[in-house]
Image (spheres, grey):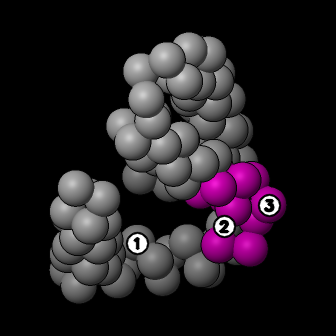
Amino acid sequence: MGWLVFLILAILIVRRYWTGRGYSAAAEMRASGELKSPLYWTYNALGISVLAIICYIVKAKPAEVGLWWLLVAGLIVVTLFVRRAVCWRYPHP
């Protein structure tokens, strides 16, 4: 099951950056300095940690899940705030 999620995620990432829009968006982010921003990397790290915790919850026993969902909800809220800060700092379509 885990390999299937990883495969789908890898296909979506590759598809995104192999299109012309992906190249131009990456070039625009590189030119504006967004790719070097700590906010950008924090946003990505939070998103990956949410995915990792959800994958752990899927594999965990039902008795162990408990407060993990509260952590996931909190991380999603923090991720949204960081994303808002990134969009505010680097406004581009």
Q: Position of residue 88 (x, y in %)?
A: 66, 40
Which residue is at the front of the view, 56 or 37?
A: 56
Q: Earlier in the sequence, mark 3 or mark 1?
A: 1
Quadrant position of the N terminus in the picture: bottom left
Q: How far is disc 2 from disc 3 in space, using C-alphas?
A: 9 Å
Q: Position of residue 3 (x, y in %)?
A: 26, 67
Q: Nearer the viewer, mark 3 or mark 1?
A: 3
Q: Which residue is mark 2?
A: 34
Mark 2 secondary-structure assignment = helix
Residue at left offset 46%, top offset 77%: 26
Q: Amino acid at mark 3?
A: Pro
Residue 76 lies left or right of residue 4; in this view the side is right
- Based on the displayed image, in which of its 4 quarters is residue 32 positioned? bottom right
Which residues are the magenta region?
35-45
Q: Amino acid at mark 1?
A: Ala
The answer to whether one can see residue 77 in this image is no
Q: How far is disc 3 from disc 1 in space, using C-alphas?
A: 18 Å
Residue 25 lies left or right of residue 85; in this view the side is left
Numbered badge on residue 38: 3
Which residue is at the front of the view, 68 or 74?
A: 68
Q: Amino acid at mark 2?
A: Glu
Which residue is at the front of the view, 50 or 88?
A: 50
Q: Earlier in the sequence, mark 2 or mark 1?
A: 1
Residue at left offset 69%, top offset 61%: 41
Q: Which residue is mark 1?
A: 25
